[in-house]
Amino acid sequence: MTKKFWIGLIIVLIVALMGVSYQKFLINPHCAYDGSPVTPICEVDIVLKEKSTKKFCSIYCATQWFKNNVTLIDHVIVTDEIRGNKIDSYMAYFVESELITNETNDNRIHVFQQRQDALTHAEKFHGTMADDPFTIDE
Amino acid sequence: MLFVAIFSLSLGGFLFLLTIRTLLSFKTTVPLEDKTKFEQKGYLVFLLACVTLSIRMIVWPWFYFMLQSFVSEVPGAMCMFGVTQILPSTVTFLQIIKPISFFIMGGWLLCYYVDKSTPTAPLARKNLLFLLIVCGVLLADSIGDIYYVIRMKPLMSVSCCATFFDVPLRPSAMIPQAIFGKNFQKILFIVYYVTNITLIALLFTSMSKKWVSVTSLPRRIILYSQYAIGIINIPVVIYTFIENIAPKLMQLPYHHCIYCFMGNGMVPDAPIMLGLFVIGTFAIGWMGILRLLCKNREARLITERLLLKVNNLSAFCFLASVIMVTIHLILI
């Protein structure tokens, strides 16, 4: 094997590591509640009245933060688990099931944009439909 | 894109006519007084071909850049898939002809390299005939590009990629499920590594005569196995990317859209992973073309040397692609 071959492989290795680092540290923000990386599929954004946004890694973390700061919150945006679409929490369907999304905080609440997806998930993972945990009393 | 398509169409048309004229007036022995004129004309044809084909080869990735640039213009489009819903039959045609044209143009350039490196150009006639086929594909590809760019109007609303890629009855799930059963995703993943590693091993084996003798397999069997596994590897890699790799790397476990994977920037090096796989696979085919068309005693040494280089390129590309995928899967 030539020197060029090894140099090429090292370059590829560096490119792959750079790609992973970009995904881990630049694209994915960290949870405003427990500091862990926020995976896009589980992301919850809490938009504050002063227009800034807090990002969370799971419904559990967002709910904990929400309970203590309810007066500061304008609205909450959740992510559809199927398509990754971001939607307002009042439009989403929540399911509490046996499937854990985050081992650290044992989050079992799942978010869906479409009712059918929520029902399918509930049936598959022995879950029940849940209320929107981010209801703001006017 | 339109400029490049029109430019390559006019150059391709001219090249096609010039190739036919050169072929009709082709003589194996040329009188000494006509030799310079004949050589210059042949040189012009091949130079024009090299320029045109190189441009057309770059157009393949460029086409996807163009589709990506239309995403914001098309109502309802979330990724390139939405754009492909406008003039779907033309886009399908372009998506099929572009890899074919990239492959045969690459093959022709390699054959030309062999011929050019030989003092008496013994493959000139074969190369001209091959160039005719290449020109046909080039013209069809260019006309397709022009038609698409002119006719494409983002007026209609299109559906999101999830309605195609994430439904349970999607073809990328049904076909492997029919072959491997219910747990097809795990099996597909294993098959992906098995076929790729086998292919890399075979390519490394044929790199040197010493390794061939160590494996004690006839060279012919190694070559045919390379072709067979190379062909099997294409659907395996495509399905594994759609079903396993893309959702895992995008961190969207239920989203199987290959266009989102390539173009949405969630995995910035995804086009490199797929590009390396494509070049690795095409390099196996290019070796086949070289073995088929460059069978000449005079060009044998140069062909052998070039075959070794293409073989190394193929092995490198497959290895690099698998390494990149594995690093992402482990670290993400």
Image (cartoon, rainbow, N blue to C red):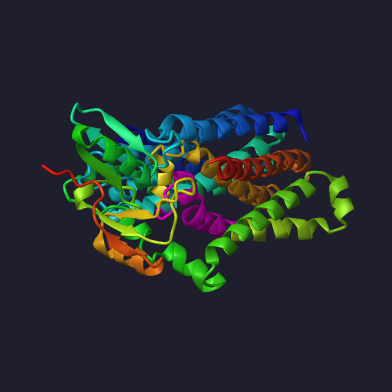
Residue B83: within the magenta? no
Horizontal and vertical percent position of residue B268 = 46, 35
Depth check: B28 or B44 in front? B44
Q: Is residue A131 above or below residue B104?
A: below
Residue range of the region highlighted in magenta in the rendering? B233-256
Farthest residue to the front: give it. Answer: A68
The foreground one among A110 and B26 is A110
Quadrant of image for the C terminus of chain A? top left
Q: Could you tell me if residue B17 is visible in this image? A: no
Q: Say how many tags the image has.
A: 0
- Whether residue B227 appears in this view of the structure is yes
B326 left or right of A127 in image: right
Residue B104 x, y percent position in the rendering: 54, 47
Q: Position of residue A72 (x, y in %)?
A: 21, 32
Q: Is residue B237 left or right of residue A74?
A: right
**Going by the image, does B266 lie left or right of B78?**
right
Chief secondary structure of the magenta portion: helix
B95 or B32: which is nearer to us? B95
**In the rendered image, which quarter contains the N terminus of chain A?**
top right
Place of residue B276 in the rendered image (x, y in percent of width and height, measured from the top left): 57, 42
Against B317, is B194 above or below? Answer: below
Asked if residue B245 lies in the magenta stretch, the reply is yes
Q: Quadrant of residue A4?
A: top right
| A86 up-or-down from B88: above or below | above
Instruction: Kindly identify the residue that appears in the image at 67 percent across and 40 percent down.
Output: B316
